[in-house]
Image: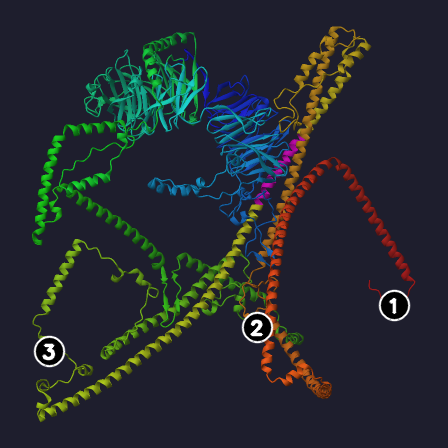
Amino acid sequence: MEAIGSLDLKWAQGYSGSEASFINKHTLCLVCGSNIKFIEIITGKETVYPSPGEGIGAFTVGGTQHLVAFSELSINPRIFVYSYPDFVEKAICQSGAKLEYSALAISHSHSYLLTCSAIPDFALSLWNWSTGELLCTKSLGNIEVQNISFNPTDWHRACLIESKQLTVWNIEQADKKYVLLPTKIKLPFEGETESRPDDKDNLPERPGSVFNKQEVQVNDAAIAGLVGEGAEDFEAVFDGGKRRMVPVSHCWTPSGDIYCGCEGGQLMRIDTETHGVKVLYSPPIPKKVFKSVSKELSSLEKEKTMSPVPDEDETDPSPSATDQGNILKEGSINCLALHKHGLFAGGSDGYLRNLHVTKDVVQVADSWKSGSPISSLSWTTNFMRLAVGSTKGSIHMYDYSSPGVAELLSDTHFGNFVGIDFLAPGNQHCVSVRQDGKVQIWSLEEEKLVGSVSIGRPASCIAACPSSHCAAVGTLSGHVYMIDTTTMESPRIVHRLHIHQTPVLQMVYDTEGRFLITGSDDGNVFVADARPSAEFKVVAQTEVEGVVMGIATNTEQKHGPCKVIIIANNNNDVMSGANKCIQFDLPDDLIKALPNYLASKHCDLKDDVINKMSLNLSIPSYGVALKSDRVFYTMASDSKKLLQITLPEEPPKKANNKASYLQPDAEFPAHDLAGGTLTFSLHRQWLASAAPDGMLTLRELDDPEHPMNVPVHSCFTGGVFETRFSSDAQWMVTCGAGDGVIACYKWNFTASGKNKATGAIEAARSNNAMLHGTRKSEDQILSGLPDWAEAASLPASRTVSKSFDGQTAALEKALEQDEIYMTPTPTLAGDPTWREVKEMEAVRAEDMEYSDVKKDLRNDIRELRRTIQNMMKNNETLPDIEKLGHDEFNLDSEEQQRLQLEGEQHVQQIREEMEMEDLAKMYLRELIKNECWDSMVVKGRSIKAFHNAVEVSNYPMRARSKEEQEELEFVTNVRQIEIAEMAARKEILDVQPKTNTKDKDKEKSAEGEGDDDESEEGDRQEQPATIGSLGAQYGGANPLFYSQFELHTRQQKRNQIVLLQDAIYRIKDTFNKAFDEVYKQREQEIARIGEKNQRITKILEDLRSTEGMWQPQMDSFEKPEKLLTVEEEEVKVDKFITEEQKAKIEEDAAKEAERKLKEKGDNARERALDMMMGGVLEIKKEDELKKDVPVPIFMTAKSQDEWTEDEKKVHAEYEKKCKELIEEREKYKKTLEAELKKIQTIIEDTTANFDDRLMNLFNKKIKTEMVVFQEELKILRLNHALLIDEELDAREEELNRQLNAKRALKHMCQQAVGQAKKMVDDYRDTYDIRVAEDKVMEKNFRKEFPDVNAAIVDQLARAYRRRPRGPRRPHVDTPIGGNNPFGERPLSARQPSNTAMLLKALEELDDVSHIPEGLIVDTSVWKRMCGVRREKVISEQEVKAQALTLADMNAFLQRRHMDDEQLKADMEDIMEELNQLRDTRLRFSCNLQVQFLLKQGQVEVDSGPFIPSYDDSILVHRSVVEDLNGTIRQLGEQKIAAMTESKDFRKGIHSLEWEHKKMVMQIEDLLNKAKNIQMLKVSRELQEFLHNEDHEGRRQQEIQILEQTLENQRGHHDKNIGERKKVLKKLRHTVRKKEKDNTDLDNQLEEMNVCVAERKHINDVNAAMRNNTGAQKRMQDIVQRRKLVDLAKAQAQEVAVLRAEVERLRMRTFPALVQVER
């Protein structure tokens, strides 16, 4: 096939919203499937180049250098670098990844390329794209990179966005050595304004970690027990809703900072120098989080009521589009692009916003709504226009100078294609349909989208009619839409057919456009008239078993029969391929003579007439293409080969016999992956196959063994979905399965290929000539059809559904009136399929045909109904024994049996479900019982008091496991050994020589009593105060306990925990024994009460009293065993009894009745007892008292007057007996009452005594709980100490690991420093040699011209030193200033070599015309001078380049030295932290926490609001306090005695003084009274008092006046208070306002302080950098100052010596009065 020619890619359409970048100021570059597309934004011209590899993976554009780089999708992928506009390969980078690349980036000014490989490498690589050389590689640590970019102003820095973090990489260079150094940026949490720095001093402090004012501080990783690389980045975030910001986009600023957009809509600025992060904007938290959930929950109610409830968003006024554009929210900063006039951001909300960032304040200056999510932003290289890409396939050009307006560049509507085909005549236009129902028409020559229309439903396939400009689109709902394409620019829907109930899977036209054949998985293939003149009427159907997977047709004769072949799958495994093959013929007169070919009114075709054959494929296959009458091709699913199969001439006799299985005639190599489609060219000589491997395979049937493979789509996106030949086979169109791309290829024939293509062209001309007339007439009809509408497509007769309620009412009415009810013919509802319509038409025709027969049957049924009704009426009058049940009148016994069977099955099903539920509950019960009851040695139970609410429960206890017992035994043995060892060691160490020296005895006897007490206490065991609990008093004593002051090692703490757990177990066991005794007593008491209640019951019966009786019982809390058994009275429902159980119960009842009958027979024992002793064996007094005295007969037979004397005596005797009986009864009653009272008193006393004992047990339980808690507190403290030990171990191990890692890095860094130093030294030598050579060339210039005059040589020397003007840099599209935010900035490293440009400029200077005037020199001499000058220029350029390189290498060496110093400092910090940690461990192990048990009076610390603080407290021995108190008491008594004596003496003095003062005051009082009497003036008031006798009335009047005055003053006071309150309220309001203002000012002050600190820090850093040049001078100053200081110190010492000598000489002149110590 390759001999025919090659397939050249003409155009490709499809854009998924991926990166679209400008490669120059007018050309946009983007990925289109497996192709690279270039779009001229001015002319709209598109150029497409196919990928030289297997698909396209990562992609990037270098606009300033006009480069495009992309990777392929394959194993060991390559990276291709191409230049534009000629698309010339610059380099191929290989061996950088094993599977795929995730991101690429090209430097803006240098020939560097950064690549990030994905799984399994995860590495960052730096390439020289000009040579394809890999410069260096650095591992990323299993993190896949999403985006990468170079700093436009400094290629030494790059930014990588990973899944949840952002990393800034520094690229360092030393000649040919490159190093990549990462710096991970710690992003802040959501809600924070900046990232928190890693402060090692700010470590978490946990409760309980404080001892002796020393805090145990470790990081989160040590607390978590992590050791390794993961410990360094570990963060303990306990708030599940708190997460770090997730970066999704970024862009560089001119200052080298990074703007980063986050997933949640936050915008950050990252300082790449200090690595600080500042959150510039964070969107507010949405108010309605669960709104979507509420909508889903209310959807069912909406569907039921069919009246939509207005949503909150609908009722609330929504903000306008302008307001929404000014609001940043989640997903609105998914892509960023920086401009001189602002930061442009786009996101999923479809808005493009221009953000102005001023002093960390973000403002939306302008916004534009694109209408679809924005996924790509790219400025032109001159920053004039912005390309805005969308995920829906559109690209707009936004001009910043025209805000709010954007020009549409391209809109191809992204989505996966589900079908393509060529429109008639088959070589000018093609039509495609996407998954969402978008139908598009493409022009082959114009290479663009001509028109489109949406059907509004998900599509599944498409086919174009050869006989008209009509396209049929199949949908997932089973509809087929007919599209009118006569006007290509505006296609329209003209008709719709509902053919299938399930999705339309396959749909083809025959070659002449007469039939449209559709297939699905509903078991039928339908044939429709393809002509618009026939209104696309469906004419017939035929049955096909399984899912239709392919349909192919062929018409060999002009207007002859159409042969159809179908492959299907009927084993419910479509992925395995088709296993059935159905072939039939469609006659040429099928439409004209349709009734002759139909088998029934359902329009199904006759199998024998259409020659239908149902065959089996021996090899499951995909795709089908029919060549001739009997030969077709398909692709095997297992071997992936092309199979050639010949159909049999006659159908097989049996369906699944051997003859029905088709065997391939030949096999040819095809594809690497299973699946795909096949298609023939019109002349049936070329076969094309497409498969998921992405290859388009073309083969010539004359030579099928040598196909031509063309890679068209990537296999990683699903490969090729479908392909089609044009009618003349000059064009081929393919569409991808998952890339959303349609590609058009055109043949480039060779000389021999043109000859072979003639047949295809002739076949196309012949076919077009044959169909020209039909096509013209059908197109006229098609264009005249009206536009299809949804409402018009449903006939009114078919849209009305049958009303069930109306039918029920009509049926009831007919039964009441005894009329014949005729069931109405059901009508179709909604949108019926063609098959449903045909079935309904057949039902109606059948109703018309058999209407008379049905009428007769209805009459007979009515008579039968009347007869049965009469029988039922007669049955009601019969006796009950003769009545029949209503079910016996049911004539439909089969229906009755069916209902009974269904009921029984339903009951059985429910019974089985209940049994399973019961079984599950029983299993759960057994689990709970085994866990909580059977495993308990001591069952949990309670004891309740008789007369109060006291309740005491025991301790449920499990049996100790074998491991626990072994551990306890081990600890016990270890502890015994330790005690024995300590005793032996003490005996050895404490042996002292016997001394009877009296002095020592006196010294010992002179010691205080407190010391004796302490020694005695030391000899005895520890007291509870120092033990820390009272466990020994409650059964928890153990001599093996460690002292709290000895728990230093970890093993001791673990052993102590085991011993404490054993003590707790024994304490609980001791209490349980006491509990059991009380429990048994309660049982005995209840039994005694029951015994006494029997007597009480007898007494109450004898007294005939209704008084209640108290009988205590044990409930389920006291006897939990009751919970495990179910009593009969607890079951509230009737028990289900099976038939066997019923029979057994009846049998037992019969036996019991028989036994009772036997007992009622002649019983001699009972008869003798009745006759001899009145039926009782013992006569009781109470029984006799119950009997009345027999009344004499005469008293009832005669009146009293008729009695005789004897009868009167009998009567008197009777009354006497009655009186005596009454007296006896009264005595017996009192006796019983006294006995009853005594028994009740005894019961009350015994129960009260039990309650007292239970109260004592309750108090003991409280104290036991206290003791248990004390022991558990010890265990918790020890566990906490062990936990801290483990944390300290983890931290120490981590520090050791870090130290070893730093040492390894230090070793590597030292090696790197040595290598760098060696490189610098070697290169410096090379540079020095080169400089010397350059100088030698300058000196040897005159020697080059020995044959030339000296004067001429001088002029030649001046020309030799002349240089051309500085070479211009190559033109780039980045303008100087203008809109470029980066402007003209100095490049960060040495420029690319300018030697070539300089030599080019030198060529012009070497021209003979530039010979200086007046210089007469030979041309050969001039050329010789030019050659020498050229060599000198080259040498100078090389010297300059080597100088720059040497400077870079020196800087590289300096950075390595800095790294070495930094590592050294880090190691010192780690060592310091490690030493501090060891000190902390030592303090922690020595300074133990001890638990004391002190009485209330022994604690003299003031209690705080909750818990006393013992930080400033000390612990002293009680004897010290007692001695001090005794001394104080003795001194106090002496002082009191002295004060008492002084008090008595002073008391006499004070008594005499008081008597004297009293007498003096009496004298003064008498004198004053006399003087007052003499000087008294009789005033008017006094006169009134004396004359007026009504003093009380006067007093009342005065009181009333005073009360009125008081009331007035009170009102005035209230008024003043109200005014003061108003003033106070205003003042408080003012205070709150001032406080708010102060708060705002404080916040502003904090922000300003932060800004000032940042600026100061930056200034200090810059100042330090600026002062680096004066380091040597400062060093000299420091050295000089140090020398001066040393000199001053020496002189000061000399002066001090001289002064001392002067003082010594002066002191020699004075006499010495004391002896001086020397």
Q: Secondary structure at mark 1?
A: loop
Secondary structure of the residue carrying tag 2 is helix
Q: Which residues fall within the magenta stretch?
A: 1296-1318
The one nearer the camera, 1214 or 407, is: 407
Main secondary structure type of the part rendered in magenta? helix
Q: Mark 3, residues whose alpha carbon is within 10 Å: few (<14), some, or many (≥20)?
A: few
* Residue at the disc numbered 3: 1170
**Residue 1101 drawn at (x, y percent):** 23, 77
Quick check: can you spot residue 1540? Answer: yes
1205 left or right, relative to 764: left
Precedes in sequence: disc 1 or disc 2:
2
Q: Is residue 1671 above or below residue 1402?
A: below
Is 238 in front, or is 24?
Answer: 24
- Tag in front: 2 or 3: 3
Label annotation for residue 1713: 1
Q: Which mark is on residue 284?
A: none
Residue at mark 2 = 1016
In three-dimensional space, the C-alpha distance between marks 1 and 2, rounded to whole angstroms, equals 56 Å
**Label 1 is placed on what type of residue?**
Leu
Res 722 quadrant in image: top left
Quadrant of the drawing holding the N terminus: top left
> Residue at left 56%, top 56%?
209
